[in-house]
Amino acid sequence: MRTAVVILNYNGEEHLRRFLPSVIDGTEGADIVVADNGSTDGSLALLDREFATVKKIVLDKNYGFAEGYNRALAQLDDYDCCVLLNSDVKTPKGWLAPLVQVLERDSSVAVVGPKILSVEEPTKFEYAGAAGGFIDYLGYPFCRGRILSTTEVDRGQYDDCREVFWVSGAAFCVRREVYQSLGGLCGEFFAHMEEIDLCWRMQLAGWKIVVEPRSAVYHLGGGTLQTNSPRKIFFNHRNNLAMLFRCATPMQRLVVALVRPALDLAAALSYALKGDKEGTRALFAAWRDFIRWHHRLAAERRQIRGGAGCESRYIYKGMIVLRYLLGKREFEKMM
């Protein structure tokens, strides 16, 4: 399969200087492409000066993670497979081959991701993806190796190649034809939750999502938005609600409609009690925008659910928050 490793960059000069050498050194059998999302720093000059062998796509402005990748992949029609790789990911030698081999071996797999470990603590899983992700019935994401804010030490306990609900957009190896046929990432999301939404739509269309831990990469995290950023709170909540409205079954939507408002109100009050007024405002703004999107989301839902050939088997039927509060903070053998 002809493969492109595509790194979306926005004002990430320091990340490129730090991490791109490992991608160049560790990647075999693929072209490396940096898609620049309208950077105003020295990113492009750095590429010209120090990484002349890397191909470039220059976009005219910052389209966000989702639409930026959509526009980049639209220009890569010579490739069978594209790996969406964050600019703050370190790749060891041989990381790519196991991922491509999964796609070559099983034509029903649309996306495969590696095991994602932390750059700062290499023995631990990284928050964004770990060893493959799932969602619970209320839409909260979790991973093999990461439940809410708790990450596990990698002891090889999740080294089996298997189907999951989602893999991280930090290292997302996808069949380009499938990506294009489903409209790619949801551009309106801008950033956060977009890969989970796309993985869900792929499963509804009959495709498999797989994690292959024979491949491991190291992710810094926080390269787009810091963990407690009000913008991150806003995008995560708004996009999660939109994803559920677009993709969930009527029964799941009903449960979400009954329970999530109370949980999100509790989260808003928690931010307020901590003195984080911006976090509280961000959460209410997420609900405001979700409600404003209702008519458009309803039309998208009819299109997505109308063509659904099957349901995902990888939605946890319980509440991950309740499980966490009861002290069960490791994935173990949940699914």
Image (cartoon, rainbow, N blue to C red):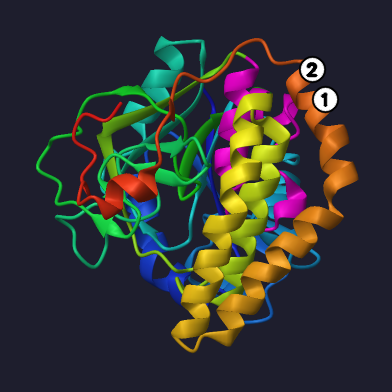
Circle 2 is placed at which residue position? 306
As shown in the figure, which amino acid type bears the numbered disc 1? Gln
Q: Is residue 162 above or below residue 13?
A: above
Q: Secondary structure at mark 2?
A: helix
Residue drawn at the location 45% of the way across and 77% of the way down: 14
Asked whether, in this view, residue 278 is left or right of residue 151, the answer is right
Residue 70 position, x and y percent, is 72, 45
Residue drawn at the location 52% of the way across and 41% of the way down: 138
**Which numbered marker is on residue 262?**
none
Residue 10 seen in this snapshot:
no
Residue range in magenta is: 178-205
**Which numbered marker is on residue 303?**
1
Residue drawn at the location 40% of the way across and 64% of the way down: 221
Q: Is residue 135 above or below residue 189?
A: above
Hey, which residue is sitting farthest bottom in the picture? 275
Dot 1 crowding, Cα within 10 Å, few <14, some 14–19, many 20+:
few
Residue drawn at the location 56% of the way across and 17% of the way down: 207
The question of residue 192 being in magenta is answered with yes
Circles 2 and 1, Cβ within 8 Å, touching? The answer is yes
For the residue pair 276 and 166, the one nearer the viewer reads as: 276
